[in-house]
Image (cartoon, rainbow, N blue to C red):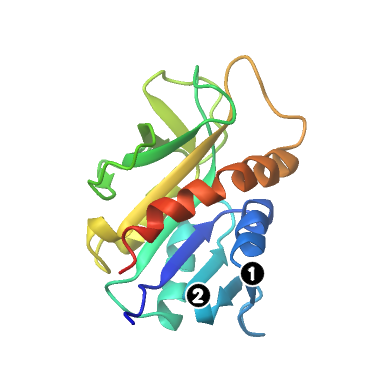
Amino acid sequence: MLKTKTVNFLVALKHEALPIIDYFELTLNNKKYKNIFSNVEKNVFLIIAGIGIENSKKAVNNLKQLNNNKDDIWVNIGIAGHKTFKVGSIYEVKKVISSNNENTFFTNSYYNEVPTSTVCCVNKEEKKYNNKYLYDMESYGFLEALDSLTIKENIFMFKIVSDNLQFKPKSYKNFAVSFISKHIRKIDTILDKYRN
């Protein structure tokens, strides 16, 4: 039997992690890092990075120390804002730009039957959405750190729309748990195609 590729998840916040921890039956990986969870039998790891580009870069490097295989699959899941996209809808991100940097980063080129979008990564909550972009605060750091570690075909990013000009959730924590739980099976099905 072929060993499946390891999947490394990165999320910014604990409440984004909870549905993934539950779905893949992850447990705290070790006492040194209180933010890394794993299920070694399923070859799945998760790190909670914290908010921001720099925290994402550090998290990728910390997780890389545990799994230093260039063929690993890397996945960022999180919530994002958009001007008009329907709240609760999921998008696979193929391109990331930054409000502060000139570089552009790309994820895989696969078509996975999920709508695709571009993310603009910002340093603080965006108030004036441009209709072209989803907005988050960690995607740029995630891709910048992975740029020299793996090929783009091993990188996946999924964003769930949490707010737009008409709606903001009362609790982003509850929203993240609810809607990531709703979409995690679909994400797992997509990733499963690329794990062998």
Q: Residue at x 59, y 73 (%)?
A: 36
- Judge left or right: residue 14 versus residue 127: right
Quarter of the figure with the C terminus: bottom left
Q: Quadrant of residue 65?
A: bottom left
* In the image, residue 100 above or below residue 6: above
Identified at 29% across, 60% down, the residue is: 154
Q: Earlier in the sequence, mark 2 or mark 1?
A: 1
Residue nearest the viewer, comparing 20 with 49: 20
Q: Secondary structure at mark 1?
A: loop
Q: Which mark is residue 141?
A: none
- In the rendered structure, are the residues bearing label 2 and label 1 in contact, judged by CB atoms less than 8 Å apart? yes
Q: Please name the residue that numbered disc 1 is placed on.
A: 25
Residue bearing the label numbered 2: 42
- What's the residue at 68%, 57% (across, down)? 18
Crowdedness of circle 1 by 10 Å Cα count: few (<14), some, many (20+)? few
The residue furthest front is 1
Quarter of the view holding residue 158: top left
Q: Outermost residue toward the bottom?
A: 31
**How far is disc 2 from disc 1 in space, using C-alphas?**
9 Å
What amino acid is found at the position of numbered circle 2 in the picture?
Answer: Lys
Numbered disc 2: secondary structure: helix
Q: Is residue 53 visible?
A: no
The amino acid type found where label 1 is placed reads Glu
Residue lying at 69% horizontally and 38% vertically, measured from the top left = 175
